[in-house]
Image (cartoon, rainbow, N blue to C red):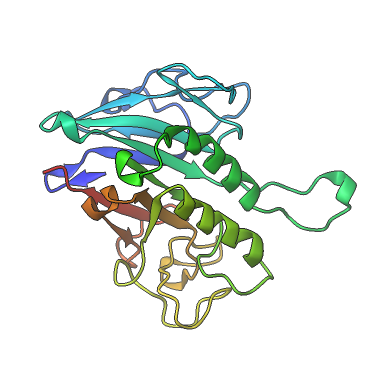
Amino acid sequence: MAQREGVDVALLQEAGSPPGDLAHMVQFKDDVFWSRHLYDRWPLVVGLSDRVKVEGFRQVPPTSELGEGEIGVSGIGTMAVAKLTPLSRPEEEFLAVFMYARWMKPHPSTCSGWKGASDVSAHRILSDLSTFVGHRDPKEHRILAAGDLNMFYGAIDQSLSLPERERTVWDRFKALGLEFLGPQAPGGRQVAATQPHVGPKTRNVPTYRTRQQSPAEANRQFDYVFASRGFHEKVKTRALNGIDEWGPSDHCRILIEVDVG
């Protein structure tokens, strides 16, 4: 999340423990977000300024009744949740959810040659996220959810995608009152050539590059932003996917601006 003065919060995909000389720069408590014996890299929501209070939810098994500061998580390393409170406008607090739909291989009994499918993790994330939806009117919620879903919005090709199954993911976000915010063009650089796996009229913007690709050759969008209907009108997003602004990661950064008045 960013304000005009700079970046206040970072949503990180595969984070380990920060180096000692950087630990003072992020707001988090050890073991609130992960258990090291299960997985060594976990999603994190961290504070980067003193303008926002970040309160992370402790991950626990998805039982039917959760404690005030807990979030039931059914997929290891798939999500992180925190309550963000702008100190200048505490009444504008909202939930920030980072989502990482990890590839899940078919069970050995299927004798399948598939490398896996990400909709399995995506549906687990949506089930866990649903616990924060407690009213029929989406305007009663203030949820911002973003991250790597490992799928193509508007997919039509089946070589790297399962379009019919993936459509159930996009539909389920809508059913939970979470509006799709892209980023979509012009909120990021589009590729000159036709993007694979999607139709020719797509507004997708590349957010991921393979090891063989340079930022200029990136042609796949895996990263997306959603927000509760009504609240989404205060949220703007853009892919920082320009050739000179991409950065060292295989994923470009996504800028999310939330208007808190």
Position of the C terminus, as image quadrant, is top left
- In the displayed structure, 191 sits above or below 173; it is below
Which residue is painted at 38% across and 18% down in the image? 29
User: Residue 63 lies in what quarter of the image?
Assistant: top right
The mark total stands at: 0
Which residue is painted at 67% across and 54% down in the image? 117
Of residues 21 and 97, which is closer to you in this image?
97
Q: Could you say where residue 241 lies in the image, as x and y percent from the top left?
A: 35, 63
- In the displayed structure, 196 sits above or below 226; it is below
Of residues 247 and 149, which is closer to you in this image?
149
Q: Could you say where residue 259 lies in the image, as x and y percent from the top left?
A: 17, 47
Of residues 69 and 13, which is closer to you in this image?
69
Q: Could you say where residue 93 lies in the image, as x and y percent from the top left?
A: 24, 33
From the viewer's perspective, tell me whether residue 253 is left or right of residue 121: left
Which residue is painted at 35% across and 23% down in the image? 28
Q: Residue furthest front?
A: 136
Q: Is residue 155 visible?
A: yes
Position of the N terminus, as image quadrant, is top left
Q: Is residue 43 visible?
A: no
Q: Could you say where residue 20 lies in the image, as x and y percent from the top left?
A: 36, 22
User: Residue 244 lies in what quarter of the image?
Assistant: bottom left
Which residue is painted at 55% across and 30% down in the image? 73
Of residues 157 and 72, which is closer to you in this image?
72
From the viewer's perspective, tell me whether residue 26 is left or right of residue 220: left
